[in-house]
């Protein structure tokens, strides 16, 4: 934390953050920073999408106002599953068709099972007149605690 404070004090950056830290780790970092007169992290980078919501919506809830935590999320489209492109099978050349993804021990649980859940959104997006990807991104964007993320123009 001392290094982060020095870099901030030199004007080389404005703040620092973490990625995939627990709420406990973030609070501990704030306590230590406050005690030592250092700058605490103010942003966290968690995975957040329609399928991965617990950490953002429950675990971090006390931190948003308590320490002014903001979020820069990753995987709002759940590795492409929430785009709907896998609903009729895994296209050749796609991320889920790659050998590196298929070798993962959690391939079925992390990707194939959620494809079925994503397809349950299809009637909703048809009624709304948007794509599955647009709905997934909008879900993340309307969360007031999401400061920024890898969003596209809807």
Image (spheres, grey):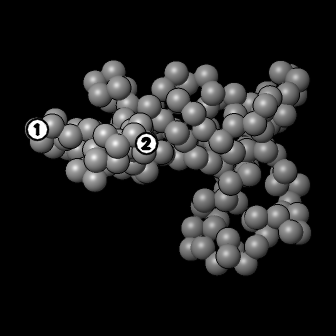
Left or right side of 128 for 6: left
Q: Going 79% across and 44% down the picture, which residue do you hit?
A: 83
Label 1 sits on a secondary structure element that is helix
Residue at 33%, 21% (x, y): give it. 65
Q: Position of residue 31 (x, y in %)?
A: 16, 38
Q: Is residue 134 above or below residue 96?
A: above
**First of labels 2, 1 by sequence position:** 2
Q: Residue at x 73, y 44 (%)?
A: 82
Q: Residues within 10 Å of mark 1 (few under 14, many from 20)?
A: few
Task: Find residue 152 and report its image quarter.
Answer: top right
Residue 50 marker? none
**Name of the residue lying farthest toward the front:** 10
Q: Quadrant of the C terminus?
A: top right
Q: CA distance from mark 2 to mark 1?
A: 22 Å
Q: Where on the picture, by quarter, is residue 113?
A: bottom right
User: Would you say residue 62 is visible in this rendering?
Assistant: no
**Camera-side residue: 124 or 28?**
28
Classify mark 2: helix, strand or loop.
Answer: loop
Q: Is residue 18 rendered to the left or right of residue 47?
A: left
Above or below, comparing residue 129 to residue 30 in the picture: above
Query: Which one is in front, 60 or 41?
Result: 41
Determine crowd level at label 2: few under 14, some 14-19, many 20+ residues with C-alpha closer than 10 A. Answer: few
Q: Mark 2 or 1, which is nearer the eye?
A: 2
Percent coordinates x, y for residue 52 in the rendering: 54, 44
Query: Where does the image place residue 150, in percent across and percent down from the top left?
Result: 65, 42
At a point 42% along the width and 51% down the height, the residue shown is 20
The residue that mark 2 highlights is 13
Q: What is the number of the mark on residue 35?
A: 1
């Amino acid at each position: 934390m001392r290094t982060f404070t020095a870099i901030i004090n030199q004007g080389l950056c404005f703040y620092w953050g973490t990625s995939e830290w627990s709420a406990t780790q973030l609070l501990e970092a704030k306590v230590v920073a406050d005690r030592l007169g250092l700058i605490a992290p103010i942003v966290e980078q968690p995975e957040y999408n329609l399928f991965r919501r617990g950490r953002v919506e429950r675990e971090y809830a006390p931190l948003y106002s308590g320490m002014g935590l903001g979020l820069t999320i990753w995987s709002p489209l759940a590795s492409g599953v929430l785009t709907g492109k896998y609903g009729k099978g895994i296209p050749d050349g796609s991320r889920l068709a790659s050998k590196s993804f298929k070798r993962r021990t959690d391939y079925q649980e992390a990707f194939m099972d959620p494809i079925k859940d994503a397809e349950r959104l299809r009637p909703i997006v048809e009624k709304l007149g948007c794509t599955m990807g647009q709905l997934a991104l909008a879900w993340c964007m309307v969360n007031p605690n999401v400061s920024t993320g890898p969003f596209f123009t809807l």
